[in-house]
Image: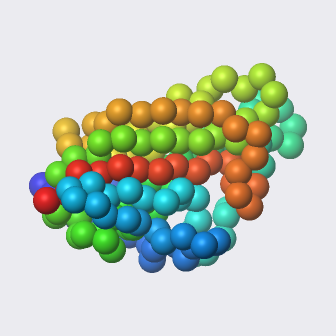
Amino acid sequence: MGARENLAALGLQLPPVAAPVASYVPTVRTGSLVFTSGQLPFVGGALPVTGLVGEGDGLVDPATAKEQARTAALNAIAALDAEVGLDAVVRIVKLVVFVASADGFTGQPAVANGASDLFSEVFGEAGRHARSAVGVAQLPLAAPVELEVVAEVA
């Protein structure tokens, strides 16, 4: 099955490409690579969850943050589709996931798995990628996660 069929089998539809919140474009293609700008977990133009990720009162729990990473990945897939079409994606090359982390939180890799798993589910072996999972103090609009993708395209 192709990426579009895999999305349907997962019960997912691509959302509209998120409008930039500053002075940039959602994607840039150079040669056979497409770079996405940072993708937040927008749903219907809003962030369903905000705050720092960690354990404890007032924090976004890691399981919720993992789901937010999956949502941000779906938004990145929508941006790739708008730039080149899903059939043109040869491979997801690199994923960088930023996690707004509370003091002492070190579970960034598990949060990032929400995005990594979706790329594998949608693109199969071509969705397996190199990755960095980085803890940061804050993200735009108080998002718990943000990610960027580099994809090889035909």
Residue visible at 25% across and 69% down in the picture: 84
Residue furthest front in the image? 30
Q: Position of residue 24 (x, y in %)?
A: 54, 70
Whether residue 149 is visible to the viewer of this picture, yes or no, is: yes
Tell which of 131 and 29 is nearer to you.
29
Name the residue nearer the viewer: 114 or 150. Answer: 150
**Image quadrant containing the C terminus:** bottom left
Counting from the top left corner in percent of width and height, residue 71 is at 51, 56
Q: Is residue 11 left or right of residue 88?
A: right
Relative vertical location of residue 78 with respect to residue 143 in this rendering, above or below: below
Q: How is the image coloured?
A: rainbow
- Residues 27 and 69: in front is 27
| Quarter in which the N terminus is drawn | bottom left
What residue appears at the point 27 percent right and 55 percent down from the top-left corner?
Answer: 33
Percent position (x, y) of residue 119?
33, 47
Residue 71 visible, this angle: no
- Which image quarter: residue 16? bottom left
Q: Residue at x 20, y 43 (%)?
A: 126
- Please tell me whether residue 59 is drawn above or below residue 83 in the rendered image: above
Toward the right, the furthest residue is 57
The residue that appears at 64% across and 40% down in the rendered structure is: 99
The image shows a total of numbered marks equal to 0
Q: From the viewer's perspective, tell me whether residue 56 is left or right of residue 1.
A: right
